[in-house]
Amino acid sequence: MTVLTLPTGVERRTLHTARGPVAASYARPRPENDLGVAVLLVTGYVGSKEDFWAVLPALADAGYHAWTYDQIGQYESDGPRDPEAYTVELLAEDTRSVISQVRAQTAGNSPLHLVGHCLGGFVARAAALTEPSAVRSLTLLGCGPSLNAPKQRAGLAELDRKLEGGSLELLWPVIKRVIPERETGLRAFWFAKLKDANPGFMHGTARAMADESDRTPELHATGIPALVVHGRRDKRVWHRSVFAAMAAQLGANHVVIEKAAHSPSIEQPQRTVEVLLNFWAQHPSVPAPADSEVSA
């Protein structure tokens, strides 16, 4: 497996879930600008913690304790080969364990800012819905409301069938468009990662995404501040109008990142950091529970 050089300021860590350890990356803020708040970025379908390495140092420079991790079954986090082990709810349970540990390692154990990319958006959303008091805000990055429309379910079923005949290398023609040709090391890393991906994770999560319903009304009811972000060219899975409608239903800002498709944190890391920091600055404290306004 091709290994990327760890960015300056990023540390390798191991966190734990009931199903086993997970490989994590952490960037710590300087003591003089430590906000005492953590952020956790949850990876997408073909992703890994390295997808966020370009943004972690900048988030730490802004005063946040910045974390990301390989979900169970992804890259350096071992997982079972059984596709049934990779439902959104099981992955969200793992995420809640990670959230608890990240919060415990941050002064004050305060709620954190949660970011989920693609599949990670579904997982982060499910974790937030189960334990909203642990989440200060939720950003859905390249993640729409669901993938259970007939065309989307058919596409995921076709992907599942193709994976039976080979590895995730079949997605390389799409992935390589995101990575500049000059980034030879990064390209080699991604190709190797696709080739060696856990088939149980790839099959299980493809099926899980097809079964995930639109939980936007539930998320809105929690009162958790939300942000919807995607690249201008991100049209393969969700149309921009779908992102916009979801944001409107959530009462959330909808930000479109120029010169990016499905992976803004890789394609436009500086702009992605700016968007996240601007959003978090608007929500420095934890919102009151939604039902507290009704009972007042």
Image: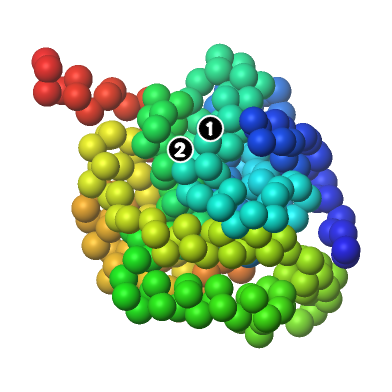
Coordinates of residue 259 in the picture (x, y in percent) = 52, 75
Residue 126: image quadrant is top left
Q: Is residue 5 above or below residue 137?
A: below
Q: Name the one closer to the observer, 253 or 197.
A: 197
Disc 2: which residue: 127
Q: Is residue 84 visible?
A: yes
Q: Judging from the image, what secondary structure is the residue with disc 2 in? A: helix
Q: Is residue 60 above or below residue 289?
A: below
Coordinates of residue 17 in the picture (x, y in percent) = 65, 32
Q: Is residue 117 visible?
A: no
Q: Is residue 125 above or below residue 175?
A: above
Coordinates of residue 48 in the picture (x, y in percent) = 68, 55
The quadrant the N terminus occupies is: bottom right
Disc 1: which residue: 96
Q: Name the one closer to the observer, 128 or 88.
A: 88
Q: Residue at x 35, y 61 (%)?
A: 146
